[in-house]
Amino acid sequence: MRHRYSLVGLILGFAAACIAAFESQLVASEPPPKQDRRGVLEVGTGNRTLTVKLRKEEPPPPRKPTSPVRVSYTLLGLAAIGLGTFSWIKKEHIRMSGGAAALGLLAVAWQWVLIGVCFAIVVLIVANFSA
């Protein structure tokens, strides 16, 4: 099999892009913290309720900067970029090598890709209005 590095790169890149696309469904959501009602005074007057805070709220605990899902699709994307580059150096099929590198880059820069797609759609709509 002549295209083994680029094929493995394509598979890893596709897996990384799928994980990146469905990241929000894969990350377990934490239940909301219970509110401490001891520091809040509520006074009901007819149809309106007046809420007064008696003490300062504590800041929320810091969130973890990276989740295991984000680390996994980033590492898979980097592996796909590396395999795509390596297969290009080994003179494998240029389209398969480029596809593996492109899918890996798509997964690594997923948030920026979404911003770029939204920007392109806005430009397309504005261009259609001027035509």
Image (cartoon, grey):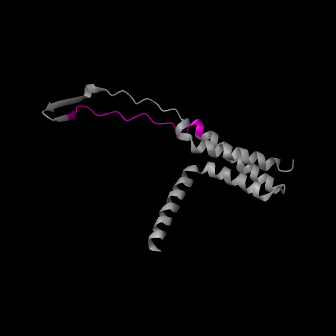
Residue furthest to the left in view is 46
- Compared to 86, does 61 lie above or below? above
- The residue shown at (47%, 65%) is 125
Indicate left or right for 89 with 71 as reference.
right
Residue 67 is situated, as x and y percent measured from the top left of the image, at 56, 37
- The residue shown at (47%, 36%) is 63
Residue 39 is situated, as x and y percent measured from the top left of the image, at 26, 28
Query: Quick one: 86 or 60, which is closer to the camera?
Result: 86
Query: Quick one: 39 or 83, which is closer to the camera?
Result: 83
- Compared to 117, does 31 lie above or below? above
Residue 64 is situated, as x and y percent measured from the top left of the image, at 51, 36
| Segment tinted magenta in the rendering | 51-69
Main structural element of the magenta stretch: helix, strand or loop? loop
- The residue shown at (63%, 46%) is 17
- The residue shown at (67%, 43%) is 15
Residue furthest to the right in view is 1
Residue furthest to the bottom in view is 131
Specify the quadrant of the image occupied by residue 50. top left
Question: Number of marks in the image?
Answer: 0
Q: Is residue 28 magenta?
A: no
Indicate left or right for 53 with 5 as reference.
left
Query: Quick one: 50 or 56, which is closer to the camera?
Result: 50
